Image (cartoon, grey):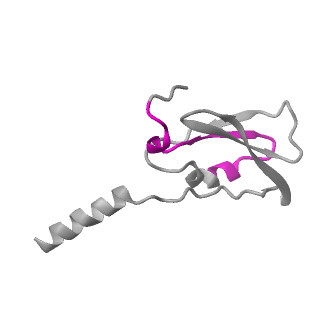
């Protein structure tokens, strides 16, 4: 009975604990062996999510856009920071950063 009780309490703790949202922390990326500065900005705010944009210092308006739809499965979009960093600097990378549903007011519409 001891292991079952321990497993139940461990599961309860995992489901009730608040985890801090990690930051992306990107300040530069490598392009052909050179460091290129990169900026993170909130492109759009909605009730359920923010749309984050990562663009290099030398961004041009005609550079292609890439949208990364982060999974809404209890994970943070920042866990995909390696994916964001892997894109070349001639891309405007956008990622959906979901809010925790418990932080969204009841009846909120978007």
Q: Which residues are magenta?
A: 83-106
- The residue sitting at 53% across, 43% down in the picture is 99
Q: Nearer the viewer, residue 92 or 8?
A: 8
Q: Nearer the viewer, residue 100 or 84?
A: 100
Left or right side of 41 for 17? left
The vertical placement of 19 against 50, above or below, is: below
- The residue sitting at 80% across, 51% down in the picture is 38
- The residue sitting at 56% across, 56% down in the picture is 21
Q: Is residue 108 magenta?
A: no
Residue 4: quarter of image:
bottom left
Q: Residue furthest front?
A: 106
The vertical placement of 64 against 9, above or below, is: above
Q: Residue furthest top?
A: 109
- The residue sitting at 84% across, 59% down in the picture is 35
Residue 68: quarter of image:
top right
Left or right side of 12 for 100? right
Whole-percent x, y for residue 66 in the image: 69, 36
Whole-percent x, y for residue 44 in the image: 68, 34
The vertical placement of 63 against 15, above or below, is: above
Whole-percent x, y for residue 18 in the image: 45, 58
Rendered-image quadrant of the N terminus: bottom left
Whole-percent x, y for residue 23 in the image: 64, 57
Rendered-image quadrant of the C terminus: top right
Q: Residue furthest bottom?
A: 2
């Amino acid at each position: 009975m001891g292991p079952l009780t321990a497993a139940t309490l461990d599961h309860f703790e995992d489901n009730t604990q608040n985890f801090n949202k990690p930051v992306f922390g990107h300040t530069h990326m490598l392009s052909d062996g050179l460091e290129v500065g990169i900026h993170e900005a909130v492109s759009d705010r909605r009730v359920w999510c923010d749309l984050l944009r990562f663009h290099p210092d030398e961004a041009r308006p005609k550079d292609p856009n890439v949208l990364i739809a982060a999974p809404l499965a209890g994970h943070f979009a920042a866990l995909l920071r390696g994916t964001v960093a892997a894109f070349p600097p001639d891309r405007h990378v956008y990622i959906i950063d979901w809010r925790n549903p418990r932080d969204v007011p009841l009846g909120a519409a978007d």
